[in-house]
Amino acid sequence: MQIHLNKIKVYAYHGWYEEERKTGHWFEVTVKLTMPDPHDLNDELSGTLNYETIYALVLETMNKPQRLLETVAQQLITELQRINSISKASVKLSKLSPAMMDQTKKVSIVLKFKR
């Protein structure tokens, strides 16, 4: 089973330059998770992964200012690895309209893990 949280838009204070960490930027986060197929859901949340938990992890991680996007993405991957039911995950972190790159809509990095 896969769960995708696509293009979560967050205003946060990440960036190499001090000014970026003061004024902030818009970011997009996409998280793709793979889990074993549930045998019997019975229409109960306890039989799957609550995606609100993942959304909260994204917001919590994005609220901790860092200089590098790679650091932010790695922190999120580390948190996802703590959830035993996740067998594989991918995090795409995009900075929208990055400073000093007028013709670039976004810069993205992708980190993955697999058990």
Image (cartoon, rainbow, N blue to C red):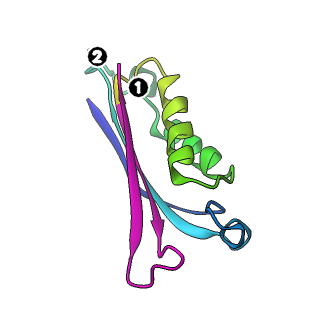
Position in image of residue 87 (x %, y %): 34, 22
Q: Nearer the viewer, residue 2 or 62?
A: 62
Q: Amino acid at mark 1?
A: Glu
Local SS, label 2: loop
- Per the rendered image, the range of residues in magenta is 89-115
Residue that protrudes farthest toward the bottom in the picture: 102
Circle 2 residues within 10 Å: few <14, some 14–19, many ≥20 = few
Quadrant hosting residue 56: top right
Residue 96 colored magenta?
A: yes
Determine which of the numbered discs, if any, sits on residue 40 in the image: 2
Magenta-drawn stretch contains 95: yes
Question: Looking at the picture, which amino acid does disc 2 mark?
Answer: Asp
Is 51 placed above or below 83 here?
below
In front: 47, or 5? 5
Residue found at x 45% / y 79% = 101
Residue named by callout 1: 44
In the picture, the quarter occupied by the N terminus is top left
User: Label 1 near label 2: C-beta < 8 Å?
Assistant: no
